[in-house]
Image (tube, rainbow, N blue to C red):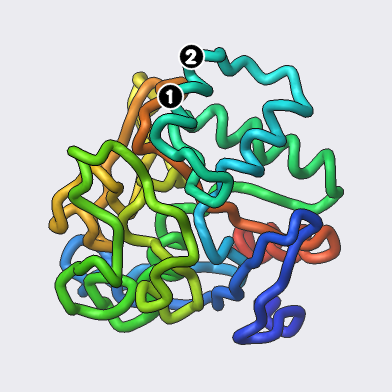
Amino acid sequence: MSQKFFNIGEIIRDNFGQEFCFISEGVFLGGEDGKQEMEVKAPFYLARNPLPVALFQAFLRDSDHDFSKEELDEMNAVSSMPDCPAVNVSWLDAKELCRWLRKKTGHYYSLPQNAEWEKAARGEDGRRYPWGDEAPADNLAYFDHLEAGTTSQMHNRPDSISPSGCYEMSGNVWEWCLDSFDDERDPHILKGGSWQNAPEYLDCGLKTFSYPPEKRRPYMGLRLLYFPQEDMLRYYQDIYAE
């Protein structure tokens, strides 16, 4: 494995000033009951926060990506501040954003796999939520705000921190994963629950899915996996090693 090229506990920043946390490889307890042995095959970095509105809108301004004014207005209605999480983002939008970021920076961006997302959210001990097993509360997550109809600005809940150093991996927005099911409808996984949901949806072991991949909804967002250019090949060598 390639752990030698990472510094455990390190927080790094990309060209846009986004912070990314180191996540180690290895076996951990996860799944629906927190008792299933799951494995992450290679270390990686994951964004400390969900993708903000400001960066998604910079992508839209700098590209010819198809995103209508009506869809942008819906994003702004739900996430009205630049540091709110971007919403109304489809799986295909997220993939195109990653391609744009790679082209702009020369570094590698992707969506995390389900197992990678879970390891970042819950660590190794099978905890139910990023902060432990304590039930969700306002200082820990933003949820059950269907009537308000909006997301929350980020950086307001330091108590939401996961063992890896990531914030708000439960609540605020459902986050896309790379994984899809073997199904002709091409469904993809979302994790973490959102501002619309009751507390039971914030469980790290829970996953939902959505299709088709171009579907946009005001509770769908993302969190980026990241590698500096020099580390990308070693990540793939570990992922696909025999």
Q: Is residue 148 left or right of residue 39?
A: left
Determine which quarter of the picture holds residue 77. top left
Task: Find residue 88 and report its horizontal and vertical position in percent.
Answer: 44, 30
Determine which quarter of the picture holds residue 186. top left
Q: Is residue 165 left or right of residue 231?
A: left
- Quarter of the figure with the C terminus: bottom right
Dot 1: element: helix
Give the residue at x 60% y 85%: 9
Q: Nearer the viewer, residue 84 or 36?
A: 84
Give the residue at x 73% y 18%: 64
Task: Find residue 13 and report its horizontal and vertical position in percent.
Answer: 73, 67
Give the residue at x 63% y 43%: 54
Q: Tell me if residue 39 can be seen.
A: no
In this figure, which residue is indicated by the disc labeled 1?
Answer: 74
Q: Nearer the viewer, residue 79 or 44?
A: 79
Question: Is residue 215 shown above or below 51?
Answer: above
Dot 2: element: helix
Task: Find residue 230 and report its horizontal and vertical position in percent.
Answer: 85, 64
Q: Amino acid at mark 2?
A: Glu
Question: Is residue 57 shown above or below 19?
Answer: above
Q: CA distance from mark 2 to mark 1?
A: 6 Å
In this figure, which residue is indicated by the disc labeled 2?
Answer: 70
